[in-house]
């Protein structure tokens, strides 16, 4: 859960200044595993929510006087009292519990690129970004390969030529065979640059998934991530998911 979603859930905009700090402290504790918070951190988050900047001296005095907070050895750093944590966990159980929301930066695929396409495409893009962000490079490589394969299939379907990549039993051919067909397909008409890089993405995903002694590294993905983004964007148009 991101800060904006949390603030909407808790109706933080209608809270008093001290309650705003109480709620944000709980957000930091439950979502970011931070047991302490500084006045500067709180001020920055209030600003992120487009809320008024508090007077630091006045707020510091309020926090010291409040039984909802605990002072630390650092004068500008506080903790949320244990009883407040328990109370807030009861009030907002959906915040304290684990959820399936993927929060990540736009490390490889910008969120704007896949937004409004299909839910599973957006989810895959977020997983690719998150796995790269948290250094899960084998997982990132395999997910990149998976999204590539899905968009190739959707591109064929969008052009009504999916029979070209199906076996006699109506299952899809291997990705290797798909890409060979895609590179020569006049109907699909992929760009020259995309044709050159398709096998690179396939091989990286295959190595990460199947080679026993191979582990993908940051440099492996960094070398191709710009070209990957360009390829995915082209396939989103070819598949009709973007116009």
Image: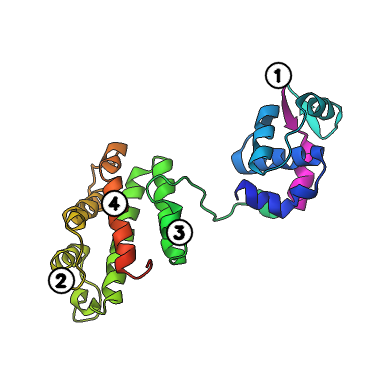
Q: Looking at the image, do the residues carrying marks 2 and 3 touch, with CB atoms under 8 Å apart?
A: no
Which residue position holds label 1?
Answer: 74
Residue 161, quarter of picture: bottom left
Q: Position of residue 114 (x, y in %)?
A: 42, 59
Which residue position holds label 2?
Answer: 186
- The magenta segment: 76-92
Q: Residue at 69% across / 33% down in the picture?
A: 43
Q: Secondary structure at mark 1?
A: loop
Image quadrant containing the C terminus:
bottom left
Q: Secondary structure at mark 3?
A: helix
Q: Secondary structure at mark 4?
A: helix
Residue 87, quarter of picture: top right
Q: Is residue 161 above or below residue 184?
A: below
Foreground mark, 4 or 3, reads: 4
Q: Residue at 41% across / 48% down in the picture?
A: 129
Residue 228, numbered label: 4
């Amino acid at each position: 859960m991101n800060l904006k979603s949390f603030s909407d859930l808790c109706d933080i905009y209608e809270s008093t200044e001290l309650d705003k700090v109480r709620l944000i402290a709980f957000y930091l504790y439950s979502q970011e595993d931070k047991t302490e918070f500084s006045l500067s951190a709180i001020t920055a988050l209030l600003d992120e929510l487009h809320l008024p900047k508090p007077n630091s001296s006045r707020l510091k005095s309020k926090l010291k006087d409040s039984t909802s907070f605990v002072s630390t050895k650092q004068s500008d750093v506080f903790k949320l009292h244990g009883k407040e944590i328990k109370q807030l966990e009861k009030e907002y159980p959906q915040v304290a519990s684990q959820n399936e929301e993927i929060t990540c930066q736009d490390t490889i695929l910008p969120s704007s690129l896949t937004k409004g396409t299909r839910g599973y495409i957006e989810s895959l893009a977020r997983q690719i970004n998150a796995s790269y962000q948290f250094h899960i490079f084998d997982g990132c490589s395999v997910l990149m390969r998976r999204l590539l394969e899905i968009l190739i299939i959707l591109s064929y379907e969008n052009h009504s030529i999916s029979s070209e990549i199906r076996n006699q039993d109506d299952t899809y051919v291997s990705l290797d065979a798909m890409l060979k067909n895609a590179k020569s397909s006049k109907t699909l008409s992929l760009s020259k640059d995309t044709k050159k890089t398709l096998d690179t993405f396939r091989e990286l995903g295959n190595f990460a998934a199947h080679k026993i002694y191979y582990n993908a590294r940051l440099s492996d993905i960094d070398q191709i991530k710009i070209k990957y983004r360009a390829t995915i964007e082209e396939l989103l148009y070819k598949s009709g998911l973007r116009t």
